[in-house]
Amino acid sequence: MLTTSKFKSLFFIAAFALLATATAQAAPKVGKPAPEFKGTDSLGKTHDLAQYRGKYIVLEWLNHGCPYVQKHYDSQNMQKLQTEWTKKGVVWLSVVSSAKGKQGNEEGVDANAAAKEKGSHATAILLDSGGAIGKAYEAQTTPHMFVIDSKGTLVYSGAIDDRPSTETDDVNGAKNYVSAALTASMAGKPVEVKTTKSYGCGVHY
Amino acid sequence: MHPFSPKLLGPALALFSLLLVPLPARANPVQSDHLQVALVSPATSVVRGQPVTVGVHFELEAGWHLYWKNPGDSGEAPRFKWILPEGLTAGPIVWPAPRALPMGPLLNYGYEKELLLPVTIQIPAELAPEWNEGDVLPITVAARWLVCHETCVPGQADLKITLPVRTSLTPANEIHTALFKLAEQEQPKRIAARVIQETDHFIVDLNLDPAALVDKPLVQFFPYESLLISHSAKQAIEFRKDGISLQLKVDNARDEPAPKLAGLIVIDGPSPRRTFDFDETIVRGKPQAAVATTKPAAAAPSKTAPGFLMVLLLAFAGGLILNLMPCVFPVLSLKILGVVRHTHDAKAARRDGWAYTLGVLVSFWSLAGALLILRAGSARLGWGFQLQSPGFIAILAVLMTLVALNLLGVFEIGIGLTRLGSFGGITPGGSAPTPRKALLSSFVTGALAVIVATPCTAPFMGPAIGFALTQNTVAAMAIFTSVALGMASPYALLGYFPRVLAAMPRPGRWMEHLRQVLAFPMFGTALWLVAVYSQLTDSMTAFKVLAALLVLALGAWIYGRYQQSDRKSFLVMLLALGVSATGIVFAIQTPDPSTLVRNTNAGDGTWEAWSSERVNALRAQGRPVFVNFTAAWCISCKANEVTVFQTDEIRQAFSSLNVATLKGDWTQQDDTIAAELESHGRAGVPLYLYYAPGSKGPPTALPSVLTKGIVLAALEGK
């Protein structure tokens, strides 16, 4: 009845201008200020971006039921990273964005028990069952890693390393993008690999 | 690393092969978590120097999926490691076209049910001399995959087939040949494309065979790599006579501009799935230049105007018809009072008419704007989305209750601190309000009418709004504006026809009676809203809303007493406001998530829950299928149910013709149903589809307002 194929007009130009403004809001972008976040951890404490101004922050999206996360925890890779960098003053926040009723959701007690069992050395585990932090950062997978520098700028976003697999053996010899970004940025050098495609299970919003 | 040495095993296998006649071309399938996997081949032997095709064949448990080579937002593609006799080499996986698999706000690309991943193995002419005629060549693959539903499970298997070496080809395995042929058909045809980046969008222009574009099939682009486009963002498509133009959102996460864009175009239409692909350098330019270079035909507005004018006209007519819909009537009744007030004053009637129009416009723009922005954020919403939120419904119920109480004269608005103008535009004494108050009142009435009217997608509105949502923002807003103007036009123009005005009855005491009578349809609307609310939550939560409304009514009554008393006590006013506020707060508080109905699309005794898989299964059985897309808040749907579907005549017709009846309930937000409505060019319910038995093509869409005759005629294939 209506021929869409025929309909194209002067509107075209203006439409894109409009769409551009509608969609160009604070999407997380490396080199730009990191999106604001505010969340409660598994012990009931609140954390937000502003309170850590002056410190480096690592955000790690977490779901212990996901085989990709298990790869990094079973191999102790994640715990080693957490220990190494928190010792150097980095704030390491593991974020659980699985919605209530979805796989991977962690209530406060579960999260503490899981963290203890896995030997997590994260600064805190943020419970984001509403998905607000996840959506602000457009976190897609577990794990999905973000590095924020002491000025609040996002300096890395993406995969934990360059081996997108569930095999524990792959941890050895993999290039760890998070360590590389922290090392370079803390030394005042530009981060070489700033954005990669994160790999893993989908975040269960 | 693999302990398998083909050379040593060769003689043993050769011996073994003598016992195997005919040879199994399919390895024993391996049963793994949520799937069964086997290495298969259409070939029954290998010939030196001739390539042989093998494939890993997955059969998946319902609901589970595997991933494409670009898995999308999450997941991982299957990987193969081939273990082959010396000299043999395996080619790359030939990936069939994937499907888009949404998961919350994320989008994955993958496969459900069944998947064949073919690989070509090169057999050299100078195959090692120990392989003699009749020897059995082992082909082994170590396959690894990730299979996901909501959770993901990695899997692996070593799969093997053995093929005897022959000097000439032996007859192929027919079952597997068919399977591989199907996979081959899905292979894309490489075409040229023009890819332009405009700030955060790619515009892809393709020329395609017009035959592939008949009836505007579903078109989807699958990028070969991630970090190019936002997978989950809506892909806007414009159809031309000889091609399409796709608008794809650039992936924000990417830190530097992408040099090239490559991917697959899948056209899902009434004809079999067709696939094309392209790999092009991205041109960056100013939007104007882009339009000028890529769309010379589009620059002539005269050519394109008639189609769009037609849409605007339809939208206007749809808006006009909205005035007659049951859900607008209560608010309309307010307008009647306003009109009557001006029977003697055409000038005031005109002013009022325009204020009303402005109210309608602003309200339409806000709703349409909200809808477009939410959709730009990839939420799959359609018209009526407002009524899919319990909070919004409760607010409306509060509003309707207050309006009804006001009409009954329980309290007045405009006496006291807030001089906002009374809704009806008249006070009980019949004294004319000040012009400014009257204008504001008309504006508010207009705005209110729109909010309540939206669920009634009048027959003309369905296609017009469906079309609007497929268009770019400006065009969509133009269409919504047209609907708004259509709806407001009778009142806007009334002032210009003094004779019509003169025919209206004179104001008088009857107006107060009318005003009070009109309170009842408003109460009715509030009741209906609570009924919808109870569909989204549970009856106890809905009852709490009713109780809260009662408290609100008490508060309003106290306020009315306070307004009429001579000695105004501040305490009484505080009490009135306190009680009202308590009522409102309890009515509109977010219901406990545990009471929210998880899935309203559940089916019932007569109607089975709709899913596209179920439709396909029933059609495959050769049964006629009738699909009814409805929602609790859709009044026209309910009307059709009572007057048509629940009659003995239609029930008998359904059962005697063995029609499978499926119901898609859209009371709650539901991406799958929204997508299905969209694919039929609709943005809202009702939608009635009939698939005739044995038919292959798209279904017949029945009109939104049904009669028994229409349904019977459709069933009889007329």
Image (cartoon, coloured by chain):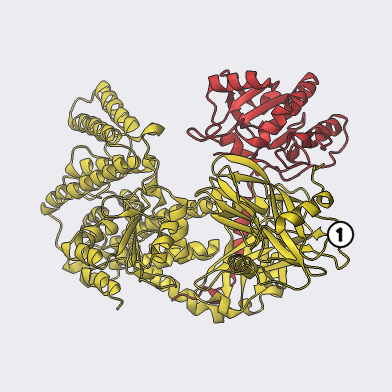
Q: Locate residue B246: give its quadrant.
A: bottom right
Mark 1 neighbour class, 10 Å CA radius: few under 14, some 14 to 19, many 20 or more: few
Q: Residue at x 72, y 70 (%)?
A: B194
| Up-down relation of residue A80 to residue B57 (above or below) | above
B338 shown above or below B277? above
Q: Which residue is mark 1?
A: B130
Q: Is residue B43 above or below residue A25?
A: below
Residue at image position (41%, 51%) is: B385
Identify the residue at horizontal 63%, vertical 46% (top origin): A25
Q: How many marks?
A: 1
Q: Quadrant of the N terminus of chain B?
A: top right
**Chain identifier for the red-coloured part of the image:** A
Q: Is residue B472 left or right of residue B506?
A: right
Residue closest to the eye, B166 or B643: B166
Left or right: where B303 falls relative to B695:
right
Q: Which chain is yellow?
A: B
Q: Is residue A16 left or right of residue A169?
A: left
- Taking depth in this image into account, of B25 and B502 the one nearest to the observer is B25
Of the pair B348 and A182, the residue shown nearer to us: A182
Element marked by disc 1: loop
Provide residue B90's location: percent of width, then percent of height. Answer: 78, 59
Observer able to see residue A94: yes
Asked whether residue B231 is in view, the answer is no
Q: Is residue A190 above or below residue A49?
A: below
Kind of residue at disc 1 = Glu
* Image coordinates for residue B680, horizontal then vertical, percent: 44, 66
Subunit of label 1:
B
Where residue B113 sits in the image (x, y, percent)? 53, 54
Point out the image quarter for the C terminus of chain B: bottom left
